[in-house]
Image: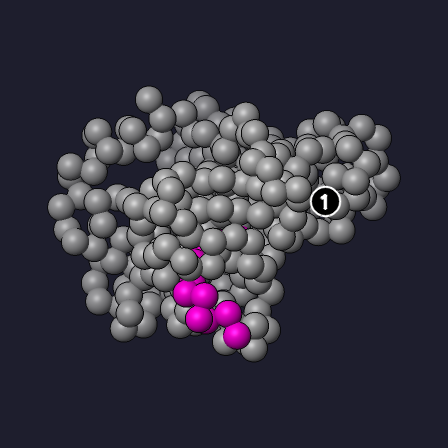
Amino acid sequence: MDEFDLIRRYFAPLATSPGADGLNDDVAEIAPGLIATKDAIVEGIHFLPDDPLETVAQKLVRVNVSDIIAKGGKPDAALLALVWPKGRPHEQLEGFARGLRKDLDRWGAHLVGGDTTSTDGPLTLSLTLIGKVGARGPVRRSGAKVGDDVWVTGTIGDGWLGLQAATSKLGLLSAEASNLLVSRYRVPEPPRLPFADFVAAHASASIDVSDGLVADAGHVAAASGAGIVIRAAAIPLSAVCQSYLDNARVTLAQLLTGGDDYQTLFTAPATARDQIAMEGQPVARIGEVVAEPGVLVLDAAGAPMQLARTGFRHF
């Protein structure tokens, strides 16, 4: 039973308000103009034991910010749950608090409450982030229509590649290369705040890319009762990802399914292409919505790619 089976079986029946959307999305609409999301990160799973706590705090904020922005919203208030290991010095909280403040300020949010407790287990952190949306409300996963274009922001694969560097799975690296890659894993770069307005104006469906591009495209397809075709050659890669791909040190499948991207994947009507191009946002058109269910990834020759997995699995 995976994460989504657990949600459907045990928790979706409890989500009776319309704004919860049956727990089929990353945010809930808790009142007109207000949305909420909640993500947790656990030491040894979502961040490494030797990661600086300042960057851990930044990542905690950003994995939530990416959900809010992908829905066309902007962050506002935050509640923190801190589960602190009993043997860990409390003085280390100074770095964590510094990183938390830095990122809350950057994304326009403020801390309003939360809870703290201790544990014999790993450091566990959770943030509830409240965001503001316009009259349209949140842009759901379920709005994609056959014929829509599929777009993605930024670049894909940097976070996964950074994790490989941080865990010494890329072989010997220069200090410069190692620092560059590891920083992309520790402190992801979601789209900037103004992109929320762009999503609200143009997107028919939208999702943040956290578990892997293919997996998250699949969530949009399933929620919309449609399918998505992705052209792998159109997916934007950073120069460092491209270099590792060219040297056959990683595969394209790994980059597309590794996760930790925290970009936005969205669909929009084909009639919006010219307007989207005029606005100059860092987006790439990577595919289209089709009637056949599921996600099909085509390689540079137009042949279907065989993927061993679509993304990160939580269970």
In the picture of the structure, the residue carrying the numbered disc 1 is: 241
Residue at image location 55% in from the left, 59% down from the top: 285
Above or below, 149 against 214 in this view is: below
**Quarter containing the C terminus:** top left
Q: Is residue 86 magenta?
A: no
**Quarter containing the N terminus:** top left
Q: Relative to the observer, which residue lies in front, 167 or 149?
A: 149
The magenta region covers 263-274
Residue 250 at what x, y percent from top left?
Answer: 72, 33
Residue at image location 37% in from the left, 36% down from the top: 117
Q: Residue furthest left?
A: 16
The answer to whether residue 305 is visible is yes
Residue 186 at what x, y percent from top left?
Answer: 62, 44
Residue at image location 44% in from the left, 46% down from the top: 228
Q: Relative to the observer, which residue lies in front, 256 or 187?
A: 256
Q: Relative to the observer, which residue lies in front, 36 or 118?
A: 36
Density class for disc 1 (Cα within 10 Å; few <14, some 14-19, many ≥20) is: many
| Helix, strand or loop under label 1 | helix
Left or right, residue 247 beside residue 23: right
Q: Disc 1 marks which amino acid?
A: Cys
